[in-house]
Image (spheres, rainbow, N blue to C red):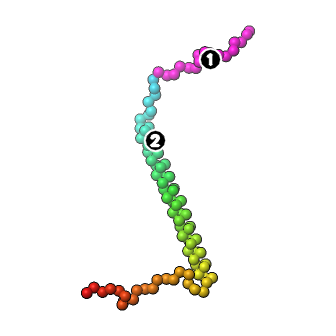
Amino acid sequence: MKRHPLTWERVISRIPPAPQEALAPPYGFATRVVAQWRSARRDETVRRWANWSFRTALASVAACALIAFLQTRRATILLPLPEAPSPASLATSP
């Protein structure tokens, strides 16, 4: 028995026909999709804020540690503290 080569017409004839009715999405599908999208977006915003806050806190701790380390190595104060105002320098109302 001789086999014929596979042609496009044969391939297309073997594909099942598409259903005539388009299936509608289940009730509430769009609402659930939008709710999941909003929660994922909110979680992403919180994650970004948390990462930024953590990095900023680490940078602050590192800067404070560096200043404290440098002040212990020097005899003079690296960052002088402001003096408290005296009563004479405060303006009084007439």
- The picture places residue 59, in percent across and down from the top left corner, at 56, 68
Say whether residue 79 is left or right of residue 93: right
Residue in the foreground of this view, choosing between 57 and 73? 73
The magenta stretch spans which residues? 1-20
Looking at the rendered image, the quarter that the N terminus falls into is top right
Tell me the amino acid under the disc marked 2.
Val
Q: Residue at x 71, y 12 (%)?
A: 3
Query: Which quadrant holds residue 93?
Result: bottom left
Q: Which residue is drawn at the image coordinates 44% and 37% (left, top)?
A: 29
**Compared to 77, does 11 lie above or below?**
above
- Which corner quadrant holds the C terminus? bottom left
Q: CA distance from mark 2 to mark 1?
A: 40 Å
Q: Tell me the amino acid under the disc marked 1.
A: Trp
Residue under label 1: 8
- x and y, in percent, of residue 87 in the image: 36, 89
Extreme residue in the top direction: 1
Mark carried by residue 33: 2
Residue 8 in magenta stretch:
yes
Q: Nearer the viewer, residue 60 or 44?
A: 60
